[in-house]
Each structure stands twice: as C-alpha cells, then as structure tokens.
C-alpha cells in the first residue's frame, strides 16, 4: 500500500482531521485522526514507520524557511498541526519521498531509454555463424 492510499483510507475511517493528536475518539463525534493517524488507521497495523520506512528520512518543512531539517514524520505532524494542511495535501506532498515500487518498467520503450546509449556489443563470430551440420546416424 502506498502512503497516499493509506492516508486516504484512514480519512474514510476517520472523517475529521485531528490536531495535536494521532487519533481522537469522542463518543459524540466521528473519530478524528491527523495525517499520521490516518496513515496508521489506513494500514490497519498501526505501525506507520514499519509500513513506510521512508518517513524516517530527514527533510525540511516546505512552509517554514528556517532551514531546520528533521524526520519526515515529524514534518508531517508539523504540517498537520501548525500549518493546518489537509491530510490529502500532506499525503500528496509526502508521496514525493516515497521510493518507487520495484518491478519491471511499464513500457518496453522506457526500458530502452533507461539503458540510454548502451550499445549492444557485437556477438563473437562463432556464436553468430550457425554451423550446418547434418544429422547422420
Ligand atoms: Zn513549518
């Protein structure tokens, strides 16, 4: 599951955005979750850092111009609580840090461009020339 999908799924489970808490349960209101809380709910495991190790990488707040860098998960909480970004905005922004899924390229034309300038070496003659042999008993 991608981080964005986990947050969006968590937003369905917790329709309100929480500030200053992962998850807020109030019996009189629908459950609330901040961006990380939504990701936690969305994964179903509650282990956000295990599901998304990229949250540990160090980066800076896109809003503050103070040059301070800290863990991405801390920035996410900060964007949620201080700058009041929506959870979807946060999920979209954070997704740029998520590594691409491993797997074959979607398009074989892309594979050629990735190789970029690689020239196939000439095959040795003995592999190219087919020996004509007759199958004699
Ligand atoms: Zn900030």
Image (cartoon, rainbow, N blue to C red):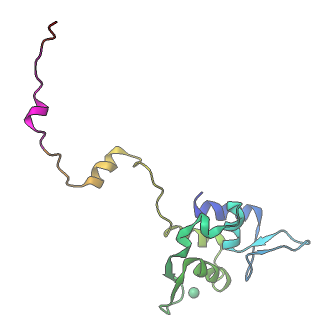
Would residue 80 be visible to someone looking at this image? yes
> Which residue is located at x 73 percent, y 81 percent?
19
Going 17% across and 49% down the picture, which residue do you hit? 119
The reply, left or right, for residue 89 in relation to residue 101 is right
Q: Give 80 or 43, whichever is nearer the viewer.
A: 43
Residue 107: x %, y % from top left = 38, 46
Q: How many marks?
A: 0
The magenta region covers 122-133
Residue 36 counted in the magenta span: no
The quarter holding residue 7 reads: bottom right
Left or right: 54, with 28 as reference point: left
Residue 127 position, x and y percent, is 13, 33
- Relative vertical location of residue 74 with respect to residue 112 in this rendering, above or below: below
Q: Residue furthest top?
A: 137
| Ligand 1, image quadrant it occupies | bottom right
Instruction: State the residue at coordinates (82%, 69%).
Output: 31
Q: Quadrant of the N terminus?
A: bottom right
In the picture, residue 71 is in which quadrant?
bottom right
Above or below, comparing residue 71 to residue 45 in the picture: below
Please state if 101 lies on the left or on the right of 51 as rendered.
left
From this viewpoint, is residue 61 visible?
Answer: no
In the image, farthest residue toward the right: 28
Residue 33 versus residue 89: which sits nearer the camera?
A: 33
Residue 87, located in which quarter of the rendered image? bottom right
Q: Quadrant of the C terminus?
A: top left
Q: Residue at x 72, y 64 (%)?
A: 41
Q: Main secondary structure of the magenta part?
A: loop
Q: Residue furthest left?
A: 125
**Residue 53 at x, y percent in the picture:** 55, 68
């Amino acid at each position: 599951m991608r981080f964005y999908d986990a947050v969006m799924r968590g937003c369905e489970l917790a329709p309100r955005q929480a500030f200053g808490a992962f998850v807020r349960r109030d019996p009189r209101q629908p459950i609330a979750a901040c961006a990380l809380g939504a990701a936690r709910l969305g994964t179903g495991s509650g282990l956000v850092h295990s599901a998304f190790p990229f949250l540990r990488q160090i980066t800076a707040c896109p809003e503050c111009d103070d040059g301070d860098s800290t863990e991405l998960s801390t920035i996410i909480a900060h964007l949620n609580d201080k700058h009041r970004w929506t959870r979807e905005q946060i999920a979209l922004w954070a997704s740029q840090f998520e590594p691409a899924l491993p797997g074959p390229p979607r398009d074989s034309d892309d594979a050629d461009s990735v190789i970029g300038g690689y020239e196939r070496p000439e095959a040795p003659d003995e592999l190219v020339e087919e020996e004509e042999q007759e199958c004699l008993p």
